[in-house]
Image (cartoon, coloured by chain):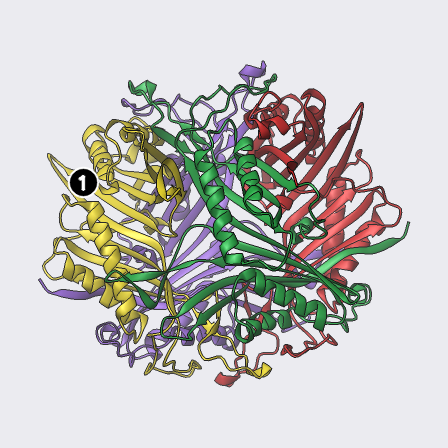
Chain colours: A purple, B yellow, C red, D green
Amino acid sequence: MAIVLSDNQYGKAETRVVRICRDTERHEIRDLNVSTALRGDFAAAHLTGDQANVLPTDSQKNTCFAYARERGVGQIEDYALALASHFVTDIAPVTRARVDVDEYRWDRVAVSGAGHAHTFVRAGHEIRTASVTTDADGAVEKSWVISGVRDLVVLKSTGSQFTGFLTDRYTTLAEAADRVLATSLTARWRSAVTDVAWGDAFGQVRQILLERFAVVESRALQQTLWEMGSAVLAAREDIAEIRLSAPNKHHFLADLSPFGLDNPGEVFHADDRPYGLIQCAVGREGAPDPGPAWDAPASFA
Amino acid sequence: MAIVLSDNQYGKAETRVVRICRDTERHEIRDLNVSTALRGDFAAAHLTGDQANVLPTDSQKNTCFAYARERGVGQIEDYALALASHFVTDIAPVTRARVDVDEYRWDRVAVSGAGHAHTFVRAGHEIRTASVTTDADGAVEKSWVISGVRDLVVLKSTGSQFTGFLTDRYTTLAEAADRVLATSLTARWRSAVTDVAWGDAFGQVRQILLERFAVVESRALQQTLWEMGSAVLAAREDIAEIRLSAPNKHHFLADLSPFGLDNPGEVFHADDRPYGLIQCAVGREGAPDPGPAWDAPASFA
Amino acid sequence: MAIVLSDNQYGKAETRVVRICRDTERHEIRDLNVSTALRGDFAAAHLTGDQANVLPTDSQKNTCFAYARERGVGQIEDYALALASHFVTDIAPVTRARVDVDEYRWDRVAVSGAGHAHTFVRAGHEIRTASVTTDADGAVEKSWVISGVRDLVVLKSTGSQFTGFLTDRYTTLAEAADRVLATSLTARWRSAVTDVAWGDAFGQVRQILLERFAVVESRALQQTLWEMGSAVLAAREDIAEIRLSAPNKHHFLADLSPFGLDNPGEVFHADDRPYGLIQCAVGREGAPDPGPAWDAPASFA
Amino acid sequence: MAIVLSDNQYGKAETRVVRICRDTERHEIRDLNVSTALRGDFAAAHLTGDQANVLPTDSQKNTCFAYARERGVGQIEDYALALASHFVTDIAPVTRARVDVDEYRWDRVAVSGAGHAHTFVRAGHEIRTASVTTDADGAVEKSWVISGVRDLVVLKSTGSQFTGFLTDRYTTLAEAADRVLATSLTARWRSAVTDVAWGDAFGQVRQILLERFAVVESRALQQTLWEMGSAVLAAREDIAEIRLSAPNKHHFLADLSPFGLDNPGEVFHADDRPYGLIQCAVGREGAPDPGPAWDAPASFA
């Protein structure tokens, strides 16, 4: 059976683009980590080492910087769409481009109660993300946009239980009528369209995720994730699908009884490993096909 | 359009199982990081919070430890196959199980020139990996096995060039007739069968990867990866496919000319980010279908 | 020359104590990472392996949890003082105790505009720290308290220059009249006394550090650190000394001229390594002696 | 009480110097992470922002690369001595220089059983270290050299106990007659002289540390560290002092009794946090004064 080159892609990962907007004395800052990946007619590069079709990853990096100057960053989804479209349009051998962007948020430093014009402090623990895939199939260009957030660390100190579960020979876990529920959420949602007010959408989705996590009386993390995801889809018809990945960051009640102390849900040990990992996708019947939207570079790793 | 639960799975991630074999006074050590993920009839857990079908992740963790005692670890592929088979066989709602295992290698400490019976030192930078997926479709059970290695850091100080590449408006990179080529390789190969002498196979594949990296005069990392992957498939008919992911860890020649010094390929700055990321899969025509083998939990993240 | 045991200490590092205050339905959360280190009469443990004087590190861990229940956490400085005093008072062989505490901050999740009673989201990038050293010299107990913050990431997009510096044969750096100045600040300040409203003090010092970073027109990071540190001492007479450690997180202006683009301080590459590292201490003449306050476990590492 | 500048230093941290020796077709590789820190007459830089005495950290970085070309790397202690001497000799305001070097080890890739001439694979988990401090006090130059190793991860599966310890109200730990003992050792030893065959010395010390860890029947980690440290000093009269820092990486016996299984020291859970942290120094009576040798930049952090 013949040995053949199959799936392949290449690009530049983790270009750290910082864009300062100095249009007025009140500067703005956008702080990005950008990765590009290209697919297309690259067989010769592999089979014979012929690089004639290969745009260097260094050029891809340069393009990230140049676009940040020429067109600005704006919302990361729009910036990624522009970069991806450029690669499939202007670089002949490229038939598909994928652009992933992480954004780190900054707040203004408060000076005498007012936000400073050009001094910032890194805000929050979480990272906003965007993943754009653009296909050039002949003359038609098609794009898929995934927005997201990761490292969104949340905890509720009550309003969570875990009871009535299946048991087997290896089960020792006791039922918990009241426990700490904590996770570091990764959420990614696929838009059905590509012309969205991305910043507003991000803020709305993030708020729904947080509110649902707060108000759902949780019978399990699975249920909480479903409630979070379905609320997002209910609120925004332009979202076709949302995927949620939630490590169950266990907080174990410290056993203080040897010291003559009770512990009515007050003192916990936050454990590192192992952790539960609960993952679910919430979709919409009849939604447009995801195509290659979820095909991450990670499928290689 | 109705909102629906789609893809979902859950499990226990990163259970750190250390198994000491004390059959003789000359101990053996196996040091593992085990993750399990289950799919099946878990809709109620999401939609209503009913956990009646949900085997706790804590029980999955316990199973990892118990199996390490009852059947031992052996090769990590066999250990993962046993665990996955258990979950789909013994836990009624489970239709698919995925078990990922990382293994850390230890050498014996040399005392007076001989390996000590029960003292070990962590060896090497790299990690051996296995990913097993088992489906129970009615009475028939089917498994896919992926073996691999990651963090295999290699460098060649000559025998690598990068010339004749495509240029565009954003290209500034100069051609390089002789450069340092370095990567931290992730390689994963899918077996066409499930009864393999896994330890021998791992050693053979690792050696082929290293040798090909060494002896191929590289015209680009793409070419090197293809040569590595196709050599593996040529040597082992039981491997259906191999996927390689290789960050191009750039080593930039230090410009010493301002100090009146030349630098004939001797002094380099090892850069962190950005890095090129080259990924390719090498397959075999007519190989068995991968099924869900490559569907990693990472597709959620 | 005889071989002798000299400096030694032992303890439990990184106990992850989470304390929920449930006095009312509006819960509070304190999230800590606690390390204890004891010195004293432990020669026999080293020289002969006799553990009769050695309180297990496991007991030290238990004590961290029990104290979180018995006395609560309150401000981390007070919690650390209580733990350190316990060790030198109640554990006979201990003559000095050191307790280090990191605190992670949480905000309430906003639901319909109001902070939720028992749901929290991890806030901020920075970590609040406290290091308490307590000596029991005979009947007298003496404590030193260091408060601090680390990972306080700040950036100013103008108002920073670096000119007029010393040059040598190896200097290629151009002067910069206007540059981005960014750092991830570690600041630690030693109190002259042990009865302080620690929470208020922390908030005040943090605000002074941020404001001075913002408003000082920087001629170098050294000058900025001095201005920050001396402003803290000027504002609070109860602080004897402050130490600042600031990596200069370089933001290099992207060279866009090959693409026919100018770059008037707008597009930067945020580099990882190497980084400048600027460190200075600001003290007060006649301040009480620091004693062992700064003797960190890190001196071993 | 006047506010004053006290201790301060600055430098360039983590310059990643890779040196290829191409004198013959059989290349050699040295892979370093170099940090420099200078002290001296830098008050004006802080107090007024006057940089006239400040050699840029960028120039320090350049010097690391230039020295790697001009004099080569050789042993890292010699390379650090040369750099430190340069700074105190050639840069007028500098009165003390500190140079820290980490070295990553590479093995040759084996091809057909022989080491390849120019292809290498990262070896081992551990890092070799050197820290040199040089003072220029008037015309006399004085240097202190600390060699070391870190991330040396070792484990013994028997031959370790922990019994007869002190107990208090908070003690729940059971005595252990036979346990796993594992650590990630940091060891640093100060030389009494500066003309040493550093590579040979490193190999000898590393071997003694490993052998003693293996053969000492451990009654506690304290005893093991003392035996390791005193054996090093006994073997090498040119070493004045050694400091050992050892996290007790707990391996907890898995409780398999609920599953009807015994566990005679065979299956363990490797825990992350908290960990014991045992630190001790072993010295020599009448050894030369350490001076500033142990004053690490870390004292600021």
Q: Hey, which quadrant is residue A100 in on the image?
A: bottom left
Query: Percent position (x, y) of residue D100?
Result: 60, 58
Residue most toward the right? D1
Which residue does the image show at 53% across and 39% down from the upper left? D228
Secondary structure of the residue carrying numbered label 1: strand
On screen, residue B141 above or below D48: above
Q: Nearer the viewer, residue C49 or A267?
A: C49
Q: Is residue C293 visible?
A: yes
The answer to whether A36 is drawn above or below residue B45 in the figure is: below
Query: Residue A54 appears at what percent x and percent y?
Result: 32, 77
Q: Residue A135 vs residue D195: left or right?
A: left
Residue D25, compared with residue B122, is above or below; it is below
Q: Kindly tell me whether residue A273 is visible in this rendering.
A: no
Residue at which label 1 appears: B135
Q: Where on the picture, by quarter, is residue A138?
A: bottom left
Please provide percent x and percent y for residue A258.
Answer: 54, 15
Front residue of this view, candidates C146 and C47:
C47
Which residue is at 58% across, 63% downward? D78
**Viewer-nearest residue: A237 or D64:** D64
Residue drawn at x 62%, y 63% is: D81
Corner quadrant of residue C197: top right
Query: Mark 1: which amino acid?
Result: Asp
